[in-house]
Amino acid sequence: MRLTVAQAVVTFLANQWTERDGAEQRAIAGCFGIFGHGNVAGVGQALLQAQRTHSAQMPYHLARNEQAMVHAAVGYARMRNRLSAMACTASIGPGSTNMLTGAALATVNRIPVLLLPSDVFATRVAAPVLQELEDPRGYDVSVNDAFRPLSRFFDRVWRPEQLASALLGAMRVLTDPVETGAVTVCLPQDVQAEAYDFPDALFAKRVWHVARPVPEPAAIERAAELIRAARRPLIIAGGGVIYAEASAELDAFARATGIPVADTQAGKGALSWDHPNAVGGVGSTGTPVANRLAREADVIIGIGTRYSDFTTASRTAFAAPDVRFVNINVAGFDAAKQSAVSVVADARAGLAALTPALDGYRSDLSYGEDVAAWQREVDHAYHLGHGPLPAQSEVIGAVNDACGERDVVVQAAGSMPGDLQLLWRARDPKQYHVEYGYSCMGFEIAGALGIKLADPSREVYALVGDGSYLMMAQELVTAVADGIKLIVVLVQNHGFASIGALSESLGSQRFGTSYRFRGADDDYDGDRLPVDLAANAESLGANVIRCRTIADLSEGLKRAREADRLTVVHIETDPLSPVPSSESWWDVPVSEVSALDSTRAARTAYETAKRGQRQYL
């Protein structure tokens, strides 16, 4: 079949499918893109031709920011449990390198995204072309080489003959639950438009089977032996439980053994918040109940977690001298962490094997009264009555109350991820979508767009602070243009609430964390800036509802839910309002020497807390 390289890419991708448990779906469901001179006549023409001639099913979505379109692709793939992904195409130079942050986010979170950055002329006949990096070490270096350390697979197609191997290699990684992340295939702008006689077999329907690795029986025996000896066990459910669709197996395992279940940011919702074994988030932003159980636990059973520093409270969460670990994880790299008894397996398959191996074992831990007391604390935080501006915890409570069981809340950065893990009551495995592997400001609205594309039947609430909104609100325009309904809750507190609180706790007095005019001392301590984010959102085509009180917010959320188009619900909050303590810690180094009393006091507290850190050997 004689096609250009770009036409071959589109045709190939349209014929890729994944299969797990007998269910097939498109591996690449569509393409986000922004066109420039590097891809408008290549991939752009190929997408247009596919649409006009119906030669390939590859829906195109016009994005407004290259980083944001990768975030949207991440939201889509995560919502589809990594079984379906999106492609992203950008022009040469700044268009492509704008995707670097998105690539880092995808790879850190192990979410499949296909990046198609345009590249320099392969022929070099016009070199140096506009926006080309000239590197005296070699003519084959371009800015796109920056994608190499951020990608799980990287290739550059210098000649049409190389395309087949590049695309097949890309799909292998995109569909591998262990190796997946950002996959980058660079397309020189002249090669994109070059024609070649490709073999027809390249474009036949190809199904990539996503396996559920089963555990080694001996590993299950070792894990069961250790758990049977436990008196104070604790389960930590990570994102792998949700990606493996293993909530039913986790429920059965927890009920059979009586072991309490804590969750990570990625694993929240694996069990409903009111499950009898659920004790909430664990670690730096976890609940006091889960963190007490973690401190006292003699065996930690990690299921589908990579043990980030927030989960381990920077390796202070698990304090018992004799604590041991059992890890069920599809990745051997993660299964071996904390010197654990390693069970390399899909979460569903691992739990299905471990449950009967523990037949007759039951933990006698008592934690029900503590959970009930904690939920009363959550109710209090939801209805704090803080004034004159409301507290952020009250905003979270209003959104939680407004959400239906299948609705989705989206967040990524600032103080809200911590408050959400502490306070949010998740009722569905897909309700809680907090990107906290990379915690990238600006993810929220773009991520919500991808989530809504992945499952239009759900209402999607993007909770975004003014810091994140100012960094990346452009995909409001994309959603408006495509008629995609989102509910954006825009929380304005005139600064960086999270970093402000962290700065104060570290002795840095909230320096540089407020949105204010410069004052007399050349610091940003003057009057608040006259910034109207609600008006900004309205100018981008959103329906806007302004709220002053929590009662206004509840009514606004009701109206937004009833609306048939994207709605931004705006409310100002007090950045100094309190939230309950997680009774945990996070390692952020404090200056060892300082002329400031506040910093010296913070250093003393830091050194005291750091004594609790340990390696699990």
Image (spheres, helix red, strand yellow):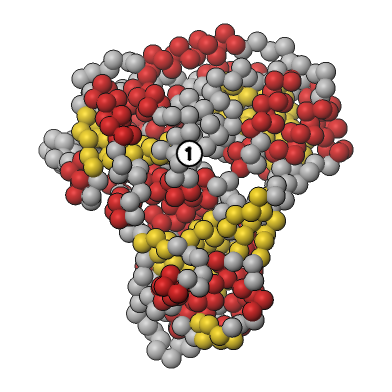
Res 91 → quadrant: bottom left
Asked if residue 285 lies left or right of residue 442, the reply is: right
- Against 561, residue 118 (above or below) is below
In percent of width and height, residue 113 lies at 52, 57
Asked if residue 263 lies left or right of residue 320, the reply is: left
Q: Which residue does the image show at 67% across and 76% down from the upper left? A: 201
In percent of width and height, residue 15 lies at 59, 66
Total of numbered circles in the picture?
1
Asked if residue 65 lies left or right of residue 22, the reply is: left
Res 348 → quadrant: top right
Q: Which residue does the image show at 78% across and 25% down from the upper left? A: 227
Residue underneath mark 1:
433
- Against 293, residue 186 (above or below) is below
Res 130 → quadrant: bottom left
The answer to whether residue 306 shows anywhere in this view is: no
Asked if residue 329 lies left or right of residue 540, the reply is: right
Q: Which residue does the image show at 27% across and 17% down from the upper left? A: 386
Along the line of sight, the residue nearer the viewer: 534 or 315: 534
Quadrant of image for the N terminus: bottom right
Report crowding for label 1: few under 14, some 14 to 19, many 20 or more residues within 10 A (C-alpha). many
Along the line of sight, the residue nearer the viewer: 527 or 78: 78
Quadrant of image for the C terminus: top right
In percent of width and height, residue 110 lies at 57, 50
Q: Which residue does the image show at 60% across and 38% down from the upper left? A: 242
Badge 1 amino acid: His
Secondary element under disc 1, as helix, strand or loop, is strand
The answer to whether residue 362 shows anywhere in this view is: yes
In percent of width and height, residue 223 lies at 80, 31
